[in-house]
Image: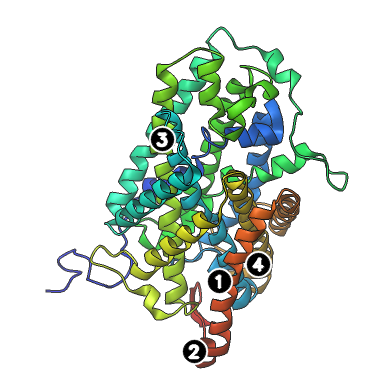
Amino acid sequence: MTDLETNKPAPNKGLQRSLKLVFVYTVATGSIFTYVSYWDSVFFGYCGSGVFLAFMLMTIAILPTALVYSELSSMFRTAGGELIYNTVGINRHVGFLASWLIMAAWIAVPPAVVMAIATFISKLFGLNLSFGAIIVIGIVILLAVFVMSMQDIQFLVKAQATCLFANIVTTLITALLILTCGHWSFSNIVQSFTYTSLDSTFGIPGWIIGMALLITPFFGFETVPQMVEEGDFPTSNTKKAICGSIITCGAIYAIFFFCVAGLAPAQELLAGDASSGFMTITAMETILGWRVWPVLYGLVSILLGMTASILGFWMSTVRMLYSMGTKNFLPQAFTKVNRHQQPILPNIFLLAVSLVFILLQNAGTFMNDFFNLMSFGCACAYALTMISAVRMHRKHPDWYAHNRNKVRGGDVMRILAMVIMVAIAFFCTLGQGVGSWVSFGVYLGIGVVIWLWMVLVRWKKSKVTIETPDGVEEF
């Protein structure tokens, strides 16, 4: 009797189609919706009390890119996303670069998130842990996530969905409590509406640069194409997960930070330790005098919300590395899976790089370094993918004839998305610090070594293969 007849996955046969659309949506939404209660000080530092408007504008700005991603993901049935789109649209070298850039954003999440969790634990229990002790806790959490990531995909997505919805509900309740606390005033928003800690550069206002850096709290929708190979739904439905995740998170961001901004002017909210994270939790404690709810909110938003994010990006990074192995961008060893159909070497590789990222950070700037690195990496990957989308449409117009997710406006919308992402990527370079560039340089160095090995050794023996609407093609 065959594995198909018994309805059981064949051992070591790769990824299995078993994911419902709702779980692909929660993977994307959970990946996006994580930074509310920790990086809130970064958001207000960049855009003041007008940060809610910045989030609304960024939601609008990123939707054209999301629509193009929806169009592209409908045409390909295997994991790979940026790897596939840029290889088919331009060439395999750009495909490798784009996938490496987007993974810079994804790989930055696990170390950033575990450091945030460890810092929150120190703050909650008044431990005053040294930065070294926080790093040790972060490493322990990373190891725990690694063990979880080796389990069945159904366990992972259900755990992530539970964490996500708990975070969303708690965040909205917190927004309502703040709005009706009796201390809230619209005048507080007006006083610091255009406040920013960023300097104007090349005549570009710091507030605009700050808004561009807010692309980080939106990246994660591009994880959807990484899950299509395991989805049991038509690829045309990916638009619901991609656009739905952005709209869901954009709406909650705007509502929540509008409510928080009314508590006090941004300068007051960012005073003291609040400038280093957990600004909203600190404001509830110091301005409103609350003791119980800030702890409950923090436990759910930090521990559960951030767990949802780290699981989403971990799964996506592993699947991108797996896809690179199946398409001959990495050695075949990256395609081996365990009995739960979880790629083995990609999980080990991600754990190793995450540990390196943690050890590269320093106590004074790690939060902003991670944030800015994520912004720059995903903005560059998005920009390249939009260029590839325009080229792919011109090279293969027949692929779009029956695409239910074909973008309205055609190349006008694709070029608009490209221009927006190029502009955001440029603005993000203006906000990078030395720590961000060091981390980015080390990461790119690893990529260059792998790429050179593929060019000089692997690709001389065998070409890249990708499943397209016309069948499997070599590049």
Q: CA distance from mark 2 to mark 1?
A: 22 Å
Q: Say above or below: 139 vs 186.
A: below
The three-letter amino acid code for the residue at tag 2 is Ser
Residue that sits furthest to the right in the current view: 203
Location of residue 418 in the rendering, given as x and y in whole percent from the top left corner: 71, 57
Q: Say above or below: 347 vs 238.
A: below
Q: Which residue is mark 2?
A: 462
Question: Quick one: 349 or 211, which is closer to the camera?
Answer: 349
Q: CA distance from mark 3 to mark 1?
A: 32 Å
Which callout, 1 or 4, points to the residue nearer the camera? 1
Q: Quadrant of residue 54?
A: top right
Dot 2: element: loop
Q: CA distance from mark 1 to mark 4?
A: 24 Å
Which callout, 3 or 1, points to the residue nearer the camera? 3
Which callout, 2 or 3, points to the residue nearer the camera? 3
Which callout, 4 or 3, points to the residue nearer the camera? 3
Disc number for residue 378: none
Q: Is residue 198 left or right of residue 2?
A: right
- CB-based contact (under 8 Å), mark 2 and mark 3: no
Location of residue 69 in the rendering, given as x and y in whole percent from the top left corner: 57, 56
- N-terminal of the two: label 1 or label 4? 4
Location of residue 5 in the rendering, given as x and y in whole percent from the top left corner: 16, 68
Q: Residue at x 66, y 60 (%)?
A: 386
Q: Which residue is mark 4?
A: 388
Disc number for residue 446: 1
Q: Which residue is mark 3?
A: 121
